[in-house]
Image: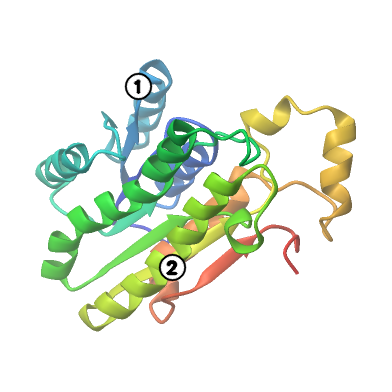
Amino acid sequence: MGLLENMVAIITGGSRGIGKAMVYAFVEAGAQVAFTYRSSAEEAIAIQDDLNTSGQMVKAYQSDASLYDDAGTFVKQVMEDFGKIDILVNNAGITKDTLLLRMNEDQWDQVINVNLKSVFNLSKHVMRPMLKARSGSIIHISSVVGVFGNAGQANYAASKAGVIGFSKSLAKEIGSRGIRSNVIAPGFIETDMTHVLDEATKETFLKGIPLNKLGSGQDVSDAAIYLGSDMSTYVTGQVLSVCGGLNM
């Protein structure tokens, strides 16, 4: 029996990268999964079709997590389709990296809306069914950049630091109702974005990582499964860094 057996999980931004890895890992752990995508419909439907052979219900929904009404419609549909929501993973995120001197308002607003406002939107909308059930786990994907900052990523760092503050505040508000709120802060994780980096750049990254390797989507997924499962029923308001020691 998997750690997430008989649980229903929402994963935003589940069609690629870390989100995709989590969709597969959650299904393997026994969960039924509803995941969102914004534009990569072909990839999302392929994931849905592949995983529906597992015998568990897996469904892709086109939804923009940064839009309040879209998020509400999505959560309502998940409740109709699955009947409950046990876990929310706020994973949707983007980058628009540049030095602040060159950053325009649109680059700031897009990153804040997708990375931070989406966390408010989804958390707000899952609150009612979780409060009614008096249980639930909300997991926010932040970044080590939100902990110690990074040049050229003021917008991204601000959004991810905001996620941490939001999660800690939420944990204090809903803990008495049996709902947990925690953060995972990944470091350098191998994704499509890191695959295009040259070896010299990767070596520079590795010099700052005590474990001397990049992380994988599975590393982040394992942390999310722990925080979503009954193994973490006394864990809330925490930031779990999955970074190979990068932020020590």
Q: What residue type is labelled 1?
A: Ile
Amino acid found under the numbered disc labelled 2:
Gly
Element class at badge 2: helix
Q: Is residue 131 left or right of residue 204?
A: left
Quarter of image, res 232: bottom left
At label 1, counting other C-alpha atoms closer than 10 Å, the crowd grade (few under 14, some 14-19, many 20 or more) is: some
Numbered mark located on residue 32 in the image: none
Which is nearer the N-term, disc 2 or disc 1? 1
Q: Residue at point 63% right, 38% down?
A: 101
Q: Residue at x 35, y 27 (%)?
A: 38
Asked whether 233 or 154 is in front, the reply is 154
Residue 11, above or below 61: below
Is disc 2 surrounded by few (<14), some (14 to 19) or many (20+) residues within 10 Å?
few
- Quarter of the image that includes the C terminus: bottom right
Q: What element carries label 1?
A: helix
Residue 80, position in %: x, y? 9, 43
Task: Out of 76 and 113, give the one closest to the viewer.
Answer: 113
Q: Which mark is residue 45?
A: 1
Q: Residue at x 61, y 36 (%)?
A: 97
| 180 vs 126: above or below | below
CA gap between label 2 and label 1 equals 34 Å
Q: Position of residue 193 (x, y in %)?
A: 65, 30
Residue 203 at x, y = what percent? 89, 41
State the residue in front, 26 or 30.
26
Q: Which mark is residue 165?
A: 2
